[in-house]
Image (cartoon, helix red, strand yellow):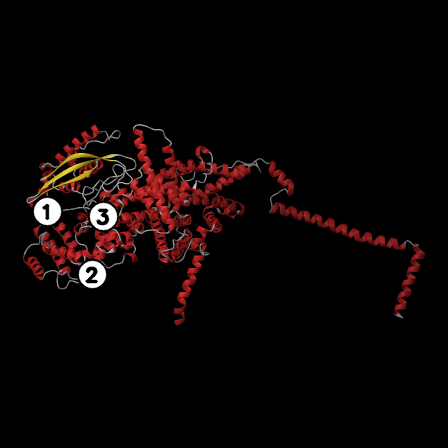
Amino acid sequence: MTSLSIWGWGSLGVVLSLITFGPFVIFYLAFYILCFVGGGFVVTLLFGKTNSEKYLEQCEHSFLPPTSTGIPKCLEEMKREAGTIKIDRRLTGANIIDEPLQQVIQFSLRDYVQYWYYTLSDDESFLLEIRQTLQNALIQFATRSKEIDWQPYFTTRIVDDFGTHLRVFRKAQQKITEKDDQVTGSAEDLVETFFEVEVEMEKDVCRDLVCTSPKDEEGFLRDLCEVLLYLLLPPGDFQNKTMRYFVREILAQGILLPLINQLSDPDYINQYIIWMIRESNCNYEAFMNIIKLSDNIGELEAVRDKAIEELQYLRSLDTAGDDINTIKNQINSLLFVKKVCDSRIQRLQSGKEINTVKLAANFGKLCTVPLASILVDNVALQFFMDYMQQTGGQAHLFFWMTVEGYRVTAQQQLQVLLSRQKDGKHQTNQTKGLLRAAAVGIYDQYLSEKASPRVTVDDYLVAKLADTLNHEDPTPEIFDDIQRKVYELMLRDERFYPSFRQNALYVRMLAELDMLKDPSFRGSDDGDGESFNGSPTGSINLSLDDLSNVSSDDLIQLHAYISDTVYADYDPYAVAGVCNDHGKTYALYAITVHRRNLNSEEMWKTYRRYSDFHDFHMRITEQFENLSSILKLPGKKTFNNMDRDFLEKRKKDLNAYLQLLLTPEMMKAFPVLAHYVYDFLENKAYSKGKGDFARKMPPLIPKTDSDPEHCRVSAQLDDTVDDNIPLRVMLLLMDEVFDLKERNQWLRRNIKNLLQQLIRATYGDTINRKIVDHVDWMTSPEQVADLVKRFRDAFWPNGILAEAVPCRDKAIRMRTRIAGKTKLLSIMPDELKHIIGAETTRKGILRVFEMFQHNQLNRRMVYVFLEGFLETLFPQYKFRELFNKLHSRSMQMQKYKQKLQTSQAPSLQKR
């Protein structure tokens, strides 16, 4: 009923509407509704817009500056003239440094940024902002550098880093040789073994990835540069990622990486070595030694090919007269070099490498070195000492050496006592008490019943000595009888000297003394070579100091004159007794010497060059200042010094020089001069610059049980000693370069004493002050400015970017290696060979040179120096931990940690 009523009423309303308004009533109704809704929407929109504009206007005036948007803003900015940016050109506070630095910045922006930036925009503000950013970084760097004390870095850190690098290289070489003597390790094996040893020594870091993987190296440099930019750039510039990445890539890829590539290049290092010692002349003997010792076929082939090329050129020349003799000598020299190279190449290719020491020990006829000569030569003595320690006879040798030191000390003390007594000063009891205490100490240590080990001599001699010590004042000769018996025991007992001559240590001693060398290579340029030895057994005393105790009375009866002049031409196949030189001719003066003793008369001939006379004259005039005004040596002559008339005149002048030197008045005026004259005229090879080893020996040499391999050199030095810094540096380098820690403590003690004497004689007691002054000079504004100028001139000669250096041919690089090794061996002083031995000196120098021939190892050393520099420059930051994290992805480091965990696992299980 309800639904019917609704429909009824609805139908009635529709009918009435149609009757009243007609059929268009529906359209009118829809139109009225639409107008109502639209009007409401329009009113709402207008009201909201008006309120929104009022609100935005309030916000605009309250918070935001009026700006344009979109493209109009860009056009407005491009049309606006850029404001001037003022650049402060002050960087370090020193004008002499700032000027070249500004030029470097200008050249860098011009050649690395402007050439591509100007193709995009003419706006200078970007370039000025980059320049300002670089200057801010340089100002921060300069300010921090001024606050750092660089003395420890230059005197300790760099030396320790270099010594550690060399030690790792030496141990890597030893590891490879211990693996298999028959297999020669390649360069890759050496590099891999090197980093294995590095992680074993460093424990917490290994740089193998950085040095062997270019990709990892670039990532390391990017990370490092980003850290440096964080420390040096203002916060606003660092937060700008685009700017930071841009500068980072320039530093890593454009500056650091090319610099590291150059410093790590072995050929660049070889050229730099040759440049540093460019003033020294190459020694022919050193050159031939390098050829004979080279184990690199590439080096030998490069030298051989160059010799063949020179031979072809010389044979093509059309010469006559005197020039033909010179050319023949040069051809013979080149033929001999070619022959040596071919022989060496053939031996290396066949794998039949010969150990000279083993060959001489098994088949060679060895020279006989007397025991008396061994005991007065420091190189020979160390080998004899090693042998005596092996056989248990070290007590006899130590006793003999201690008595020698006591005698020297006692003689000096008594001479001082005598001079003071003449001056009226009395200290007799004190001096004699000191001598008695020293003599009793020797007796208790070696001869008493409590001595361990005890020197075995006749009991009556020991009892006689004890009685003398109890009732008489000690004299320098108090131990002479027992010392003589000990010497005879060491000489004749089959356990000691006779067996030593059959031991491998004896052969090694001969090698150190250069007495296993082929005599046909002996001789060098004028002033560097050794003279011809006139003795039939000339090779016996080639490298020994004969420090015979010859009195002044014996030398007063010594007469000498030059009897003849001998010419020595170059002959590549010469026998022993002929001095050889590289295509040169020189004169030898035959000196006939007569010596009359009380019961005998001796005569011999010895041969000396003019350079030997010159060296001898320099030595005695430096030792005795008054001699320079009395003795006048004939002067040198550069040209035509082989003219016979000139040589006859020089012979007369040298004769007059000898006669004046040997006058009794001269000997009495300079008593110590007698030892120098006898050494010069004795029948043996004269070695330039040799000193008296017996006077360098410490008075009392105690026995030592410490192992130098397990103690650091710097830790053994007294910090209160004035020359501690240079002594630490020199000892550390000598230990690692020449592997002296493997030698006995006696040799190292004498080297230390000799270096102390050298330092004090050169610098006195102000050595530390001089080192500090030198470091200050190195970091002074003048020196820094000079380095910046050199950098600028190297990269931008005459203001123009330098072109890339073309890669050098392999043969040229190989010959450069030969030249570098030859130069290094040529400048080694004879004094160094006399201290540690010729063979040890050669091995040490060649080991250092070989270390620089591996690019990866050179990179490692450069990065170690860089890390030390940054740790010193930023001491307040934990750069050590940062570097450990950057190198933590090393494969060698991971293997080492796994090895440690494996080794520690059993102990942890037991716990």
Please name the amino acid that badge 3 sits on. Leu
Mark 1 or mark 2: which is in front? 2
Q: Residue at x 10, y 47 (%)?
A: 415
Q: Are marks 1 and 2 in contact (CB under 8 Å)?
A: no
Residue in front for this viewpoint, 25 or 676: 676
The residue identified by callout 1 is 415
Quarter residue 638 falls in: top left
Q: Identify the residue at the far left of this view.
A: 471
Is residue 732 something that shows in the picture?
yes
Q: Residue at (53%, 47%) from the top-left corner?
A: 241
Percent x, y for residue 324?
A: 31, 30
| Residue 397 on image: x %, y % | 17, 56
User: Disc 1 versus disc 3: distance between alpha carbons?
Assistant: 24 Å
Which residue is drawn at the image coordinates 43% and 58% (left, top)?
A: 893
Residue 501: mark in rendering: none
Please tell me whether mark 1 sits on a helix, a strand or a loop.
helix
Asked if residue 821 lies left or right of residue 237, the reply is: left
Query: How many neighbours does mark 1 have within 10 angstroms: few (below 14), some (14-19), or many (20 or more)?
Result: few
SS at mark 2? loop
In front of the other: 859 or 589: 589
Question: Farthest bottom residue?
Answer: 910
Where is residue 46 shown, x and y percent of the image? 74, 48
Query: Mark 1 or 3 closer to N-term?
Result: 1
- Image quarter where the N terminus lies is bottom right
| Cα distance between the residues tagged 2 and 3 | 28 Å
Q: Nearer the viewer, residue 386 or 253?
A: 386
Q: Is residue 748 visible?
A: no
Residue under pointer 2? 392
At label 1, the amino acid type is Gln
Q: Position of residue 239 (x, y in %)?
A: 52, 48
Residue for badge 3:
754
